[in-house]
Image: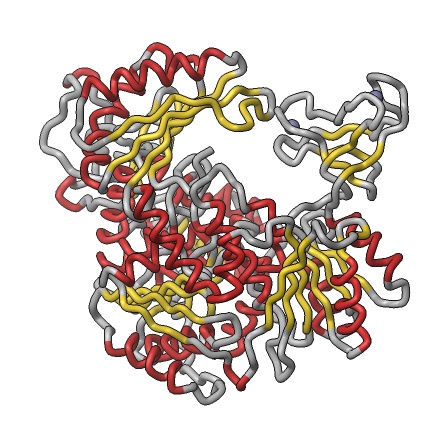
Amino acid sequence: MAVDVPLRRLFDYRCPSGVDAALLQPGQRLWVPFGRQRVAAVLVELASSSTVPEAKLRSATALIDETPVLDPSLLELLLWSAEYYRHPPGEVLSAALPGALRTGAAALETAEHWTLSAAARTGELPPLSPRAHKLRELVEWLQRHEAADEAALGALSSRWRDHLRELEKRGWVRRLQVTPPAAPRVAVAASAGPEPTPEQRDAIEAIAAAAGRYAPFLLHGVTGSGKTEVYLRAIDAVVQRGQQALVLVPEISLTPQLVARFAARFAVPLAVLHSSLTDVERLRAWRAARSGEAPVVIGTRSAIFAPLANAGLIVVDEEHDASYKQQEGFRYSARDLALARAQRLSIPVVLGSATPSLESLERAQSGRATLLSLPGRTGGAKPPAIHLIDLRRHAATQGIATPTVLTIKRHLDAGGQVLLYLNRRGYAPTLFCPSCGWAAPCPRCDARLTVHRRDGRLHCHHCGTEQRIPELCPTCGDATKPVGQGTERIEETLASLFPDVALERIDRDAVRKRGALEAALDRVTSGEVRLLVGTQMLTKGHHFPDVSLVVVLNADQGLFGTDFRASERLAQSIVQVAGRAGRAERAGEVLIQTEYPEHPLLAQLISGGYDAFAAAALEERRAASWPPFARVAVLRAEAARSDVPMEFLERAREAANALAVRGVEILGPATAPMERRAGVHRAQLLLHAPSHSPLQRLLARWIPTVEELPEARKVRWSIDVDPLELF
Ligand SMILES: [Zn+2]
Ligand SMILES: [Zn+2]
């Protein structure tokens, strides 16, 4: 049995009494005693013997499900993932179930009905007192009817629940759980989309031709090339065949337009799964996916575990997006699991992006996926012209260089919209004292506090610490000043430069309230707002048809990152945000401000676009032997005392060396670049291997010994296989 506890093992139980063991199936839930609790656990395997001594083997108490909540294919995928990511199987299986099911709720939608008990019908019970009018009335009514539901009983009496409880206690009635009939399938009446271009048609046909077998596709289409139309047509074909399509999107709240487009296109129920659903909503969507009632299932990362009655296709939109990798607990990649799941189901899987991950590009280059290209924008829109602005040569007003200001003015005068991108929220990244050099530090991190003007406070973006902004420097008593730019400050600067132009800021602080993002986006698309400043949020899938100029205010944050993926992420952000410009008839313009205009990454992006960058970046990865040309895993540790994580990692390293698996290199331990975060000290050990199998061979034997180290009890540790970030 898989029990939802942080232990990398399964647990043995006896079959519950009164249940025929031959009828049990893996994937069913049972109530089991665990310690002093009773928990819902998932049956993984039936065994005829156990290593647990006879006297200690406990019995499961009851069977919860008639039919398994996890079908054999999904169960197998989950158990494989637990092995691959070295995560406790009980927690992995739990991640695949809606919260309500983890605590034993019914997997099928049932309604309670009441009927007279057999004893009541045969007259074996002592008669009810003549004074118990209400009870007698109910019994008489039930004698005339087969069974009654809530609605029928509610019509008889307002206190029917009390009366029934009393009758149940005396043995007169019993409850029945009735499964309502499935909702009738709605005929597909897809509203016709635009006529596909020849490239779109080729892609749609290639996906359709792969029906019924495992076929991974990389759909690489520049922004505005109509990837979504390819998804919609491929899904339409699947739905017409009576099958289901599973669509993964990075973040529902950031892609309301995409969901709306799906809803408008298909006249069938959509099951939507994302993190802000209530338990009830989530269970309902899960059931609709499982019963097949919803032919289209759309959701964020964890929707990769949605049950499907009859799967025909998986689509992963914006497959390069970092949100597909879970960064804590069960550290899986939904993008990678989409491939694994499609393989098990023998169905095609489409990974789509304007800026594919280097992993996916390499997969296509090596022939392990089919590349489908949409090189041009639909409707004849021209790609934007990109220019660099050298920040060393031009005077800047609070982070906006003079040529940039002039270009913004030109676009506004011509009636265009302008989008400014800066991936740093708040007012300024530092509060600095020019007299003594003090810079407001976070008391819990090796980091500086960010100045937020709106609420007049200093915020730590790493641990959430907040402080009042001190009026004077706490060290020397002189006046302090905010240094550098965040989106709040850019908003202020723009307001003073263009006082008559309506302005909107979109970042996590500005659109905190529910519905605020949609409202802000509406003001932009309606043309009410002409200037738009925002963070990473702006790079995600929104369509701004009238934006004619995009300004990347600071490209330098990612140029010299310590992480091997830093340049890939920077290139993706720049290309994604640049893609917001000039989507309609108007050709767009993009300005990138930098202090390093001669940097090869920027040069490649400008001369050859994302493809040229990706080709060069893949060569670099190959030369340096980084993923996708190697496999890595990271053992991270943290503790309040600074020496403890390093001690643990040293012991872990010795244990790994003792296993001597050929090909696996062990690097470190090393402290994190920001060693202290939220009051804890962090360090890590990096495992590097030329391929998947030696790394997995080592992990399989090593993690159990790491778990047993005495030092392991003094730290919080985790293993991250295929990490997205090294720290
Ligand atoms: Zn000072
Ligand atoms: Zn902090």
The residue located at (35%, 41%) in the rendering is 722
Q: Is residue 92 visible?
A: yes
Q: Is residue 180 visible?
A: no
* Left or right of 320, for residue 704: left
The residue located at (79%, 59%) in the rendering is 402
Q: Is residue 205 above or below residue 42?
A: below
* Left or right of 272, for residue 622: left
Residue 251 vs residue 618, the one in the foreground: 618
Q: Quadrant of ligand 1?
A: top right
* Left or right of 63, for residue 526: right
Q: Hey, which quadrant is residue 468 in on the image? A: top right
For this orientation, the residue located farthest to the left is: 48
Where does residue 318 sit, x and y in percent of width and height?
46, 61
The total number of labels drawn is 0
Where does residue 129 sit, x and y in percent of width and height?
51, 43
Where does residue 46 sit, x and y in percent of width and height?
15, 38
Q: Is residue 450 above or below residue 140?
A: above
Where does residue 61 sit, x and y in percent of width and height?
29, 32
Residue 635 vs residue 5, the one in the foreground: 635
Q: Is residue 554 above or below residue 468?
A: below
- The colour scheme applied to this rendered structure is secondary structure
The quadrant in which the N terminus is found is: top left
The residue located at (47%, 54%) in the rendering is 321
Residue 338 vs residue 406, the one in the foreground: 406
